[in-house]
Image: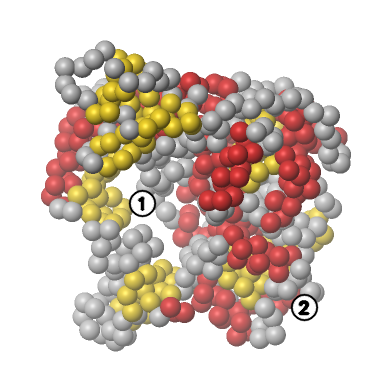
């Protein structure tokens, strides 16, 4: 009888001991039993017979995890403070290791002199940042790099935000690489996923393009990892393991000997500071744009309406951005000033008129729109902070002969809906697109003559050290949708015109100036850790975070920035408290995080969200 240490996939438990009459290899996937439940596990090591009785391994699967995968998972478990089983569950096991051979392969892409210089710079660095203006031709450089990777007999991973996988990008990839490329994201069917994994095992696929989960597929002999729109927060997981796919791409590149390229028109300050970059300026097509400002508090002011009218009269299209989906963020009572809050979360619920409902965007609780204030009974309740549905409705009333389309998470619920809306927009069947941050990502259509940006001051006012960086980056991304070819205009509604006027034309200068403010306080100079305690009883959640704070005092290299109630005190019936710490040393923060792990607090290293 042999005895094995087995890591339980998706389980927070430490590895457990099981026995088998078979001789099993390290990394083998097996079925095991725990509390009468059948689970998947991974063989970690052979051990001596223990003093206690062991359960039998039920079944040995064909799939396994190569040694390099086990090593990467161990790093993830250590750095992102989760169990090895949770880290391993990110990866897709393999059955065999296919052999890739060099191919005589070429695309029809011709790079400009400046693009060629960027290409040469990337080839000269193990890791680099392509800091290219919107429309400067970053995608063509990516394609050329993929072409060379295939010719070298290697494979590539192309990471994009979920919404970056637009029909336009899919068509471009398929045009150049045909059956050598596979697209991987959350909306493809189980049958399609199985086919892709089968093709990977047979060595048919040279490039995997997809969202952050594509990083964990069993692709072999990886020569290149490209992370497009590297500034996008969707690369960071909001649940355990709370990994950042961009950071892991850089680690995987080192471990696997692969070149890594990050690309963005608005790179994060950390990437700009730490990674060698090539500045690609200008636009690939002949284009120019002009920016106007409107300091009116009314979301659809006469200036906004008149500018949209002028653009539509020229048979050009318009995109309208605002930071809030649904109709409004909150419903407020005029008499007592109370917001209509979710009973399970300490947040106001959003108004969805079409569904005649208030919905919580945190726990998905919904209720019928009240006719009076639940707290004081007053019937004079108002909605504040305009949302996509209200803007789309009001624009439809202004421009009755035009097609107005909503473009947010409520509207775009499937890949087919995304494809349908963007196809219609590309064919000029939609005149005005009203949306949230989805508008900023990967839509390169040439007839947009105006980008309207509403509500941006609410983003600047968020209590987050990245607020200025995020607001400016988002405005630049939205502005970049206008005038992709020819002349375009941008209208920004803000009370902070001097800030945007100073930096809209020079994001690089903003990053340089912002580094001065961050020094000695925040990333990229400091590392940060967020520790979160939650419980159905408020006093127990508070006692937990008090204990965490007490333990943190024993780590002299760690500075406690603050601790107490979270910005959103309650979600899904649980009260939330948190502690925010910073240090010059990742090691010190991780030692603190692992020391409080037995208290069942959530650890988020390098946090991006503080809500």
Residue sitting at 82 percent across and 33 percent down?
105
Check the image and report above or below for 607 versus 499: above
**In the image, is 562 to the left or to the right of 480?**
left
**Crowdedness of circle 2 by 10 Å Cα count: few (<14), some, many (20+)?**
few
**In the image, is 86 to the left or to the right of 121?**
left
Position of the N terminus, as image quadrant, is: top left
Residue sitting at 46 percent across and 74 percent down?
327
Callout 2 secondary element: helix
Q: Nearer the viewer, residue 231 or 149?
A: 149
Q: What residue would you read off at disc 1?
A: 611
Q: Is residue 452 visible?
A: no
Counting residues from the start of the chain, the first of labels 1 and 2 encountered is 2
Check the image and report above or below for 472 versus 14: below
Q: Is residue 417 visible?
A: yes
* Protein image colouring: secondary structure
Q: What residue would you read off at disc 2?
A: 313
**In the image, is 153 to the left or to the right of 260?**
right
Tag on residue 406?
A: none
Mark 1–mark 2 CB contact (< 8 Å): no
Check the image and report above or below for 354 versus 113: below
Using the rendered view, name the quadrant where residue 221 is placed. Answer: top right
């Amino acid at each position: 009888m042999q005895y094995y240490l087995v890591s339980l996939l998706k389980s927070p438990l430490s590895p457990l001991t099981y026995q088998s009459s078979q001789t099993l290899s390290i990394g083998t996937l097996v079925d095991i039993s725990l509390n009468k439940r059948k689970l998947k596990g991974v063989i970690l090591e052979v051990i001596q017979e223990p003093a206690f009785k062991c359960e039998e391994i039920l079944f040995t699967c064909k799939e396994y995890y190569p040694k390099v995968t086990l090593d990467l998972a161990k790093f993830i478990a250590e750095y992102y403070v989760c169990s090895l089983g949770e880290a391993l569950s990110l990866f897709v096991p393999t059955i065999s290791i296919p052999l890739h051979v060099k191919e005589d392969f070429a695309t029809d892409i011709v790079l400009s002199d400046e693009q060629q210089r960027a290409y040469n710079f990337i080839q000269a660095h193990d890791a680099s940042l392509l800091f290219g203006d919107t429309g400067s031709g970053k995608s063509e450089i990516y394609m050329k790099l993929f072409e060379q990777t295939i010719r070298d007999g290697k494979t590539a991973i192309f990471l994009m935000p979920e919404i970056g996988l637009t029909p336009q990008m899919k068509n471009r990839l398929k045009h150049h690489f045909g059956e050598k490329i596979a697209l991987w994201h959350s909306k493809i069917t189980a049958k399609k996923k199985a086919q892709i994994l089968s093709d990977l095992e047979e060595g048919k696929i040279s490039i995997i393009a997809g969202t952050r989960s594509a990083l964990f597929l069993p692709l072999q002999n990886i020569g290149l990892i490209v992370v497009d729109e590297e500034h996008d927060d969707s690369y960071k997981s909001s649940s355990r393991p709370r990994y950042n796919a961009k950071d892991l791409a850089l680690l995987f590149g080192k471990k696997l000997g692969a070149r890594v390229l990050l690309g963005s028109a608005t790179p994060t300050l950390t990437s700009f500071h730490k990674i060698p970059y090539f500045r690609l300026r200008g636009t690939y097509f002949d284009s120019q744009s002009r920016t106007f400002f409107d300091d009116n508090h009314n979301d659809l002011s006469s200036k906004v309406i008149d500018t949209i009218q002028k653009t539509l009269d020229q048979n050009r299209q318009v995109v309208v951005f605002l930071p809030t989906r649904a109709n409004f963020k909150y419903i407020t009572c005029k008499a007592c000033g109370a917001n209509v809050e979710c009973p399970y979360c300490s947040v106001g619920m959003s108004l969805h008129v079409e569904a005649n409902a208030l919905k919580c965007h945190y726990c998905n609780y919904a209720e019928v729109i009240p006719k009076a204030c639940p707290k004081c009974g007053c019937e004079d309740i108002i909605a504040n902070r305009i949302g996509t549905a209200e803007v789309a409705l009001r624009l439809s009333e202004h421009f009755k002969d035009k097609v107005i389309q909503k473009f947010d998470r409520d509207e775009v619920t499937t890949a087919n809906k995304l494809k349908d809306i963007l196809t219609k927009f590309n064919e000029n069947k939609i005149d005005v697109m009203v949306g949230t941050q989805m508008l900023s990502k990967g839509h390169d259509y040439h007839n947009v003559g105006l980008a309207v940006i509403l509500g941006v001051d609410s983003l600047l006012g968020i209590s987050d050290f990245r607020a200025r960086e995020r607001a400016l980056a988002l405005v630049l991304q939205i502005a970049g949708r206008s005038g992709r070819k020819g002349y375009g205009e941008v209208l920004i509604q803000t009370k902070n015109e001097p800030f945007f006027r100073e930096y809209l034309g020079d994001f690089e200068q903003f990053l340089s100036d912002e580094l001065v403010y961050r020094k000695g306080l925040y990333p990229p100079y400091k590392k940060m850790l967020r520790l979160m305690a939650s419980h159905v009883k408020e006093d127990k959640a508070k006692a937990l975070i008090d204990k965490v704070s007490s333990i943190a005092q024993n780590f002299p290299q760690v500075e406690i920035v603050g601790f107490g109630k979270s910005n959103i005190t309650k979600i899904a019936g649980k009260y939330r408290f948190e502690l925010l710490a910073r240090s010059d040393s990742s090691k010190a923060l991780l030692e603190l995080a692992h020391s409080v792990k037995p208290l069942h607090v959530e650890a988020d290293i390098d946090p991006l969200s503080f809500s």
